Image: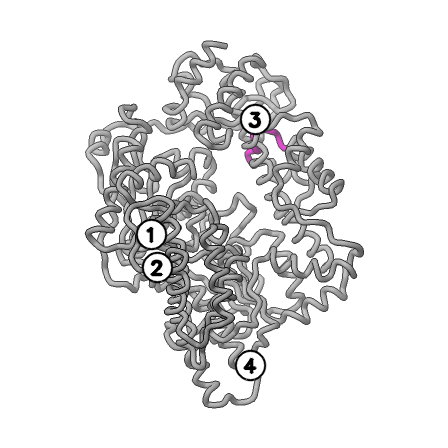
């Protein structure tokens, strides 16, 4: 410990701890590890851990340069750095796993490996396409993307091309390939990288792990540099990331982890909550703090979120299922607000129109800013209807995942103007300087009427003005704090490097996965019908559980207003056979349609015994094999011309709707269709992989292809 603080130091320490609730303060003052923070949505976990680091620095327990805070996105790392800087702990390193590993790899490569470090591969698609061509395999863009994701999963799971087939035996192979073929592509991809002298992002972690394991001097240097570790979103660590963290730590226990198993939504990338859930098994003496006070959402929203998870917990207890982690029960701290609404619409177009109309009422009637509203959906292909509906009522929007904020011309021009001005201005308030400087680029206090390019440019500049005000407010609130235009320019440059964009004014359109970590005053969860939520290819209990957690993440993004909706048909005038998501059972009021069907018997899928190959009689172990009814090594029982006709149709359908080909039908399902040659919708519906949603969308077209073939 350091010497006793001066009066000024004690005032800084108190400023760091003030405003924290009892549990957050418990986190902030638990400066020695191991510490496990179980933090529910909206409970202020980032606040708690950044105040913990800052308190450790101000009390002299931590040297800022010897603390490494790790999170999972560049945006989250940039936000953490900003908060730490605001708290007077700017020397602390806050990085993603990849960024921290890459920095170490670049530094140690000459002495540990020798020579020049290979170039870093930004995108795998080109090399995977070449790898497939070397093997004379036919692939389209969607298949390449899916194979890339599978190879990433394999590498973060620390699998090689040799060990992949056995480990992936229970997974659905990508793009209709079997596991042996994927392993061959995997090996070919590794060979292509070697030929080109490049490494990918997973290699950065793998090589760093290898160096730390094999070179004791490098490991000692890293452990001397970093004495204390904080890991945010710990439920999302992969086996490879956990191995790297173990090597960073060595035999020490100065580790604080923060996470929520109920927000595990990236299992398809190799993330697993296992390390969070078993933390106290590994560290029996660990301090465990639960953050359950939800400061984000109203009691009505919190009650719905709790209810969604509680329903599954009750089922898991009856089933004695151990893979479902008992969730944290949130306790709302905000004042009551409006009850969540549930709306059933006749078709997708009607659903989009009613959402746009309600958003217009929120903006005009309740003064909710457009930038505080979001429409969240399961797949990116759902956005188009909402883009059109918002445009029709004159509401601007921003598509999350579209053009990056700092790549926009007006933003680049603004940063140049601000940088030039920072060399000549004095100590004027930044919040007053920035609007004046940006006026030369077209910024005005009042937003221009209408939409289009002029309005989009204004919204970009307005976001910079708002950001300047927010940062200044935080910086000057710290004792001795100051904030200059040069500081603001530095902040913008760091945010640009991390793609940490400020909040915009348009309604946000985003997928549920990309909404993680964000929040809005009003959230519209749309398309909540079976086949979309849960998604149709979630065909195992664990996959369905992850879909439930994904909806939970969506619900907990809302501060005040929450609207949930679904449609009974895809197109106007279509058959109304869609059903609302099973996750809404017990949470939503019954509709007239429910009452009409209340007495109907819902057919249940029969539980079959082990499936066997109809050719050789061996047990079928994968979903793809069970769909076709044969082993991957046994000859197909379909006409190749029919199968290719179906593949050609699927490719055209995927391109026209801008979705991956497997979303239409997997190769395994197409093979099953080609073998069965169904002649009616009823016969087609009986095949595995053809659910109600796909039957409605593609049934007639598939029958036409078969008839023509």
**Of pointers 4 and 2, the one earlier in the residue sequence:** 4
Kindly identify the residue that appears in the image at 42 percent across and 12 percent down: 679
Q: Which mark is residue 330?
A: 2
**Residue 150 placement, left or right of 561:** right
Kindly identify the residue that appears in the image at 25 percent across and 36 percent down: 344
Do callouts 1 and 2 mark residues in contact (Cβ within 8 Å)? yes
Give the CA separation, mark 4 to mark 3.
61 Å
Kindly identify the residue that appears in the image at 48 percent across and 60 percent down: 415
Which residue is more in the foreground, 306 or 699? 699
Q: Which mark is residue 625?
A: 3
Q: Indicate the secondary structure of the residue bearing disc 3.
A: helix
Magenta segment boundaries in residue numbering: 171-179
Image location of residue 613, percent across then percent down: 58, 22
Q: Is residue 431 above or below residue 306?
A: below
The answer to if 172 sits in the magenta stretch is yes
Do callouts 1 and 3 mark residues in contact (Cβ within 8 Å)? no
Q: Quadrant of residue 139?
A: top right
The answer to if 574 sits in the magenta stretch is no
Image location of residue 46, percent across then percent down: 45, 64
**Of pointers 1 and 4, the one earlier in the residue sequence:** 4
Q: Indicate the secondary structure of the residue bearing disc 2.
A: loop
Q: Which mark is residue 60?
A: 4
Do callouts 4 and 2 mark residues in contact (Cβ within 8 Å)? no
**Of pointers 1 and 3, the one earlier in the residue sequence:** 1
State whether residue 277 appears in this view: no
**Residue 560 placement, left or right of 158:** left
Kindly identify the residue that appears in the image at 55 percent across and 57 percent down: 497
Give the CA separation, mark 1 to mark 3.
38 Å
**Of pointers 3 and 2, the one earlier in the residue sequence:** 2
Q: Which residue is mark 1?
A: 305
């Amino acid at each position: 410990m350091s010497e006793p603080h001066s009066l000024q130091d004690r005032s800084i320490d108190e400023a760091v701890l003030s405003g924290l609730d009892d549990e957050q303060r418990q986190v902030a003052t638990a400066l020695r590890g191991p510490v496990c923070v179980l933090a529910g949505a909206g409970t202020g976990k980032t606040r708690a851990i950044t105040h913990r680091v800052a308190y450790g620095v101000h009390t002299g327990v931590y040297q800022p340069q010897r603390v490494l805070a790790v999170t999972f996105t560049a945006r989250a790392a940039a936000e953490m750095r900003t908060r730490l800087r605001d708290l007077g702990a700017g020397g602390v390193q806050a990085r993603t796993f990849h960024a921290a590993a890459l920095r170490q790899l670049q530094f140690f490569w000459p002495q540990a490996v020798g020579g020049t470090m290979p170039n870093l591969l930004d995108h795998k698609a080109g090399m995977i396409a070449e790898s497939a061509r070397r093997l004379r395999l036919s692939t389209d863009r969607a298949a390449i993307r899916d194979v890339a994701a599978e190879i990433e999963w394999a590498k973060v799971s620390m699998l090689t091309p040799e060990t992949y087939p056995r480990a992936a035996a229970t997974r659905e192979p990508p793009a209709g390939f079997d596991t042996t073929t994927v392993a061959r592509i995997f090996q070919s991809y590794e060979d292509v990288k070697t030929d080109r002298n490049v490494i990918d992002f997973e290699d950065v972690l793998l090589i760093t792990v290898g160096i730390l394991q094999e070179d004791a001097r490098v490991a000692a240097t890293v452990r001397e540099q970093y004495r204390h570790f904080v890991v945010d979103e710990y439920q999302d660590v992969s086996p490879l990331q956990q191995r790297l963290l173990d090597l960073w730590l060595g035999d020490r226990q100065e580790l604080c982890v923060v996470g929520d198993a109920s927000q595990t939504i990236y299992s398809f990338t190799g993330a697993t909550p296992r390390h969070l859930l078993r933390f106290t098994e590994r560290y029996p003496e660990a301090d465990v703090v639960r953050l359950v006070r939800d400061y984000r959402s109203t009691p009505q929203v919190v009650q719905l979120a709790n209810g969604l998870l509680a329903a599954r917990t009750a089922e898991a207890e009856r089933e004695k299922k151990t893979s479902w982690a008992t969730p944290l029960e949130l306790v709302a701290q905000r004042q009551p607000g409006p009850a969540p609404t549930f709306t059933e619409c006749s078709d997708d177009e009607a659903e989009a129109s009613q959402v746009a109309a309600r958003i217009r009422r929120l903006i005009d009637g309740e003064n909710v800013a457009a930038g505080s509203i979001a429409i969240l959906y399961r797949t990116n292909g759902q956005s188009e209807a909402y883009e059109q509906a918002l445009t029709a009522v004159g509401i601007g929007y921003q598509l999350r995942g579209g053009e990056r904020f700092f790549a926009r011309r007006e933003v680049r021009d603004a940063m140049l103007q601000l940088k030039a001005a920072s060399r000549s201005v004095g100590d004027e308030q930044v919040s007053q300087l920035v609007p004046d400087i940006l006026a030369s680029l077209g910024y005005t206090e009042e937003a221009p009427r209408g939409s289009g390019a002029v309005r989009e440019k204004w919204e970009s500049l307005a976001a910079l003005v708002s950001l300047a005000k927010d940062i200044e407010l935080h910086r000057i609130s710290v004792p001795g704090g100051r904030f200059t235009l040069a500081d603001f320019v530095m902040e913008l440059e760091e945010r640009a490097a991390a793609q940490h964009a400020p909040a915009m004014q348009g309604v946000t359109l985003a997928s549920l996965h990309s909404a993680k970590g964000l929040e809005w005053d009003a959230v519209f969860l749309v398309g909540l019908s079976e086949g979309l939520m849960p998604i149709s290819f979630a065909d195992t209990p664990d996959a369905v559980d992850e879909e439930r957690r994904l909806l939970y993440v969506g619900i907990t993004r809302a501060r005040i207003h929450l609207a949930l909706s679904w449609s009974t048909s895809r197109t106007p005038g279509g058959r109304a056979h869609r059903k609302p998501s099973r996750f809404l059972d017990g949470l939503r009021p019954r509709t007239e349609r429910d009452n009409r069907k209340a007495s109907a018997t819902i057919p249940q899928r029969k539980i079959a015994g082990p499936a066997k190959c109809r050719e050789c009689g061996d047990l079928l172990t994968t979903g793809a094999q069970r769909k076709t009814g044969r082993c991957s090594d046994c000859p197909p029982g379909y006409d190749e011309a029919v199968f290719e006709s179906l593949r050609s149709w699927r490719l055209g359908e995927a391109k026209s709707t801008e979705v991956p080909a497997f979303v239409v039908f997997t190769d395994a399902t197409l093979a099953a269709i080609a073998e069965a040659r169904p002649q009616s919708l009823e016969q087609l519906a009986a095949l595995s992989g053809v659910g109600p949603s796909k039957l409605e969308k593609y049934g007639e077209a598939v029958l036409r292809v078969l008839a023509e073939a």
